Image (cartoon, rainbow, N blue to C red):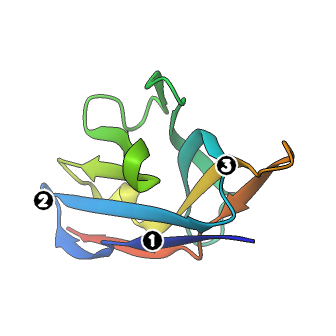
Amino acid sequence: QVQLVESGGGLVQAGGSLRLSCAASGSIFSINAMGWYRQAPGKQRELVATISSGGSTNYADSVKGRFTISRDNAKNTEYLQMNSLKPADTAVYYCNALVEDSRGVQRIYWGQGTQVTVSS
């Protein structure tokens, strides 16, 4: 089994910054793509950013230039640096990872979610 544990959420004023972390542990042979998603109340979960095993990144238009996704492969950890936060960024943020186990089986795992609240 694989577990993803998130940390770093909280309450911040508009214009402020937060850094989210997501650490993967368990039966991991390798981690391919990793990503961050968010879900605001009454809305569907949406993509925020993704990063490939080689470091290629992709961002939602709404966060481009403000958020930065990164990863530390040695620590099986990904990060989301969020700057210039807006009230519209308020949501539960979820990390995910495409993990390959020792048998070569790939599966997507999700974190438990961390609340980010941006006050105006």
- Residue 113 x/y as whole percent: 54, 73
- Image location of residue 8, percent across then percent down: 30, 72
First reached walking from the N terminus: tag 1 or tag 2: 1
Q: Is residue 85 above or below residue 26?
A: above
Separation of marks 1 and 3 at Cα, in angstroms: 20 Å
Structural distance between the alpha carbons of marks 1 and 2: 20 Å
Q: Which residue is mark 2?
A: 16
Disc 1 target residue = 6
Decide which of 13, 109 is in the foreground and name it. 109
Q: Residues within 10 Å of mark 3 (few under 14, many from 20)?
A: few
The residue where tag 3 is placed is 29
Q: Is residue 6 above or below residue 72?
A: below
Q: Amino acid at mark 2?
A: Gly
- In the drawing, does residue 69 fall left or right of residue 54? left
Secondary structure of residue under mark 3: loop
Q: Residue at x 26, y 49 (%)?
A: 81
Quarter of the image containing the N terminus? bottom right
Whole-angstrom CA distance, mark 2 to mark 3, is: 37 Å
Mark 3: amino acid: Phe
